[in-house]
Image: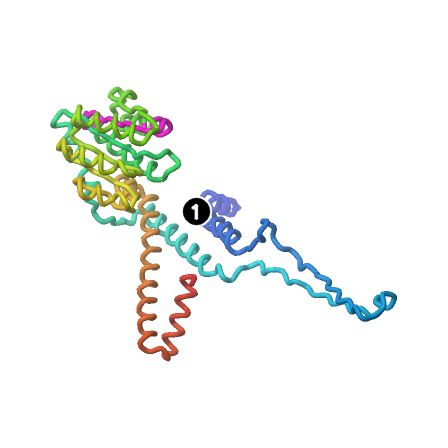
């Protein structure tokens, strides 16, 4: 009897069961969001509506129209509850969600997950160490957008790692910001990094300042500070626009080691040309998992890569099938395979 009481308790407290239940609930939410159609006003059709069409006979007298007028009733069918056109999207959501869940479970169970080497992240310790040896400061620019931009959040994640390394090496880090909310978040991030490094007394909130919301006013202040103080290392992590080349050229002129990261494809060429290391696109968002090594983040990263790899394989197969279909248009197996690929990819 005692064993039967333990079984439900283990089922409830088991972390694996909780994760599976959360995954099933997520699938139910996605199924409800994508499988059920709504009308233009947001209401879901429940029952068919009847439309009565009366065809009046103009040639008959008015008193005889009541008996001779035919009445045609046509029912407009309701839309189906399940939209079959979204089946491919639902299957892809299930596949990627399962890949992420399994990858996180494998990472937490101790399975090693290998991430390819990223040179820009490997150079963080060397860049901070160089600033310490030269006795000069470290400049960290977290972009020019507010906290509602995902690139700013990723930049502050990198700031946490850089600040922790700077605290361990007893280096000075300067963080000028152009948004007041970013300043507060940066202060909390740097404070937590100094606490984790055991150097809480070395934290100074005055080094994390708010300049102005104006784009080029902020750029003018940062560039002037770079020319006067000549930091040994400059980090540009976040969302950048026209100021990217100004920052990178100024840092290159003062001889600083520069590490940049952004997801703005229009600004990447300037960082690549003028900086020593650049995090390109998704490398910028994978930096937190790469540096922290936490199983949950590594598993999530691996699950997303599995989904991307599957999509890439299907795209290659579709290109081959379309090429063969052009050469041999009457090949029935190729036509069948091409139709299946179109349905799987949602085409």
Total count of labels: 1
- Determine whether 288 is above or below 49 in the image: above
Question: Residue 75: x, y in percent?
Answer: 68, 64
Task: Inspect the magenta stretch and tell me whether residue 247 lies in it.
Answer: no
Residue stretch in magenta: 167-186
**Quadrant position of the C terminus in the picture:** bottom left
Query: Is residue 276 or residue 306 the one in the foreground?
Result: 276
Residue 93's quadrant in the figure? bottom left
Residue 277's quadrant in the figure? top left
- Determine whether 66 is above or below 108 in the image: below
Please give left or right for residue 252 compared with residue 77 in the image: left
Question: Residue 186: x, y in percent?
Answer: 32, 29
Query: Is residue 189 or residue 70 the one in the foreground?
Result: 70
Please give left or right for residue 66 compared with residue 89 in the image: right
Kindly identify which residue carries mark 1: 19
Question: Residue 3: x, y in percent?
Answer: 49, 46
Residue 323's quadrant in the figure? bottom left
Q: Label 1: how many residues lie within 10 Å, few (<14), some (14-19) or many (20+)? A: some
Please give left or right for residue 54 compared with residue 194 in the image: right
């Amino acid at each position: 009897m005692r064993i039967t009481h333990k079984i439900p308790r283990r089922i409830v407290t088991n972390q694996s069961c909780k994760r599976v239940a959360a995954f099933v609930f997520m699938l139910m939410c996605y199924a409800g969001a994508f499988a059920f159609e709504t009308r233009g006003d947001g209401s879901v059709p429940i029952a068919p509506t009847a439309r009565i069409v009366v065809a009046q006979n103009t040639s008959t007298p008015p008193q005889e129209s009541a008996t001779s007028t035919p009445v045609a009733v046509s029912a407009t069918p309701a839309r189906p509850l399940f939209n079959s056109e979204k089946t491919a999207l639902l299957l892809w959501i299930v596949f990627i969600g399962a890949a992420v869940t399994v990858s996180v479970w494998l990472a937490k169970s101790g399975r090693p997950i290998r991430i390819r080497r990223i040179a820009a992240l490997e150079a963080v310790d060397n860049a901070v160490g160089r600033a310490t040896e030269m006795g000069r400061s470290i400049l960290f620019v977290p972009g020019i957008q507010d906290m509602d931009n995902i690139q700013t959040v990723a930049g502050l994640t990198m700031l946490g790692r850089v600040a922790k390394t700077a605290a361990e090496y007893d280096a000075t880090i300067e963080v000028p910001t152009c948004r007041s909310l970013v300043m507060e978040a940066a202060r909390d991030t740097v404070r937590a990094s100094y606490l984790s490094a055991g150097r809480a007394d070395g934290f100074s909130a005055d080094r994390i300042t708010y300049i102005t919301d104006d784009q080029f006013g902020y750029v003018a202040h940062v560039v002037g500070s770079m020319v006067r103080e000549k930091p040994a290392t400059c980090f540009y992590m976040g969302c950048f626009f026209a100021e990217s080349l100004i920052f990178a050229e100024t840092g290159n002129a003062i001889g600083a080691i520069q590490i940049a990261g952004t997801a703005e494809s229009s600004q990447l060429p300037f960082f690549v040309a003028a900086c020593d290391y650049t995090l390109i696109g998704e490398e910028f968002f994978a930096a937190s998992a790469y540096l922290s090594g936490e199983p949950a983040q590594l598993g999530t990263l691996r699950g997303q890569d599995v989904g991307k790899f599957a999509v890439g394989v299907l795209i290659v197969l579709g290109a081959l099938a379309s090429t063969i279909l052009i050469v041999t248009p009457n090949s029935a197996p190729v036509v069948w395979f091409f139709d299946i690929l179109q349905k799987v990819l949602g085409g």
